[in-house]
Image (cartoon, helix red, strand yellow):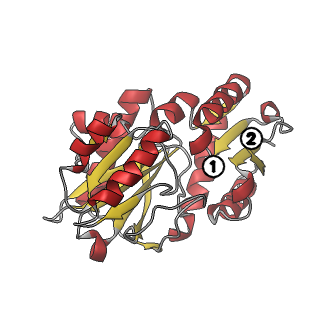
Amino acid sequence: MPSVLIASCAPALGRDEDEPLLLAALAEAGMAATVADWADPAVDWAAADAVVVRSTWDYAPRRDEFLAWARKVEAATRLFNPAAVLAWNTDKRYLAELAAAGVPVVPTAWAQTEDELDAALAGWEDVVVKPTVSAGARDTARFRPGERAAARALGARILASGRAVMAQPYLARLDADGETGLVHVDGAFSHAFRKGALLSGAALGPGLFAEEEIEPRVATAAQRAIGDAVLAAVADRTGGAPLYARVDLVPDADGEDAVLELELTEPSLFLTADPRAAARVAAAIAARLH
């Protein structure tokens, strides 16, 4: 019986709604699966036939350590998604590469210094500020007109932590439409969901993730075409389709969708949004093992 280790983190154990569904689907597919903290030195990752990165939601403040762990695991057994994919995807400057490849991406300004921060924030009155390395909306906040000083203060704190800053316009249609998440398994579309808009106010602090409103959604043909374009760009960049991917889309003022984020590292796949989704992931893992 093939064995699979699901990589999580200690604070997330028992908090990932995907976890019990995936474990049950793996068992149904004839695989023995358990969950372990990626940072636990007692875990024998090499003993598993495959390690699947899932709820490693505490990696961002320890990115170098996390990537070193991924490379070590990959040297001993199969790792999904691969270490090189994780390294590329854990810095959101990948968005610039997607835009260069012709994928519609939310306009983004980048800053590595305080002078660049001022220029980045000058582009929009209603702006979202976040680090280029973060997870679960940590250190991310929306700032409305008149809140430029607060936006700059958050950006300065991010820079002081050694991370670059990204700024994006807040797209007002989010308030009613929300985000559309497209989940792909083995490069193929699996299911979609709606995620509620980011609330304004103080950035999320030490928590693992921001609480979100999630419900199933039927993706349009245009949205699926964007998702397919993103996955094609990923395959060109990384040499193949990832085991799992989540493409988060947001509507602009004209209702046209653009990529907000591409999640290839530890995204919630919201398997509860489609009763067949967990089985698709398990089948894709089984296919890669065989």
Quadrant of residue 280 in the image?
Answer: bottom right
Q: Earlier in the sequence, mark 1 or mark 2?
A: 2
Q: Residue 176 appears at what percent x and percent y?
A: 28, 77
Residue at 75% in and 35% down: 49
Q: Could you tell me how far apart the alpha carbons at marks 1 and 2 are, in whole angstroms? A: 10 Å
Question: Which residue reaches farthest right?
Answer: 42
Residue furthest bottom as drawn: 176
Quarter of the picture holding the C terminus: top right
Q: Mark 1 and 2 residues: CB-CB less than 8 Å, in contact? A: yes
Give me the disc on residue 58.
Answer: 1
Please tell me which residue lies in front, 139 or 136: 139
**Res 285 label:** none
Whether residue 75 is situated above or below residue 102 in the rendered picture: above
Rendered position, 204 above or below 188: below
- Type of amino acid at the residue the image marks with label 2: Ala
Residue 278 sits in quarter: bottom right
- Residue 244, image x, y percentages: 51, 46
- Looking at the picture, how far across and down is residue 31, in whole percent? 76, 48
User: Badge 1 local density, few (<14 within 10 Å), some, or many (20+)?
Assistant: many
Q: Nearer the viewer, residue 166 or 14?
A: 166
Q: Is residue 113 above or below residue 137?
A: above
Q: Is residue 81 left or right of residue 235?
A: right
Instruction: Name which residue lies at 37% across and 36% down.
Output: 94
Q: Which residue is mark 2?
A: 39
Whether residue 75 sits left or right of residue 203 in the image: it is right
Inspect the image, locate mark 1, and give the three-letter code of the amino acid beneath it: Asp
Q: Residue at x 38, y 28 (%)?
A: 237
